[in-house]
Image: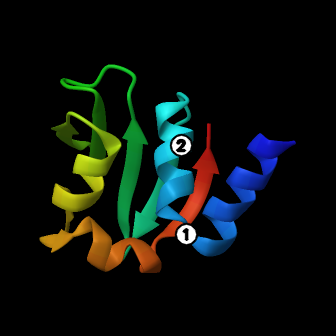
Amino acid sequence: MVHDLIVNELFEKRSLAALIFLIDCGRELEFKVNGNKCFISCDGSKKYVSLYVNKEEQSFDSVSELISDATIADMKFLVVWEQAELEYLF
């Protein structure tokens, strides 16, 4: 029940707290930003978590670090997050 509420918060409000919680719980997210295919996962990451943009990996020690330091099409993750088209949460 609570997990479903957090998933809804992610998809309806683009909540960063929900994103952090769900990825830390082992979920994976597939989304698009301006035509770029993106995927966030801890599975097989060079560090703790990775953001793949068009299959190019950026790895980070935490989801918070990913949010603050990752880039998509030369733009900071935080700048483009609101434009993201969330597709699948695995």
Instruction: Report the residue at 27% width, 66% height from top.
Output: 77
Instruction: Report the residue at 56% width, 63% height from top.
Output: 86
- Answer with the quarter of the image where residue 18 lies: bottom right
Q: Position of residue 68 (x, y in %)?
A: 22, 60
Q: Nearer the viewer, mark 2 or mark 1?
A: 2
Residue on which disc 1 sits: 14
Please, which residue is most extreme toward the top here?
A: 44
Q: Vertically, is 66 above or below 48?
A: below
| Local crowd size for mark 2, using a 10 Å CA cut-off: few (<14), some (14–19), many (≥20) | some
Left or right, 39 with respect to 76, comes to right
Q: Position of residue 73 (x, y in %)?
A: 18, 69
Instruction: Report the residue at 28% width, 38% height from top.
Output: 62
Please, which residue is most extreme toward the left here?
A: 74
> Quick one: 13 or 35, which is closer to the camera?
13
Q: Which mark is residue 21?
A: 2
Instruction: Report the residue at 34% width, 44% height from top.
Output: 63
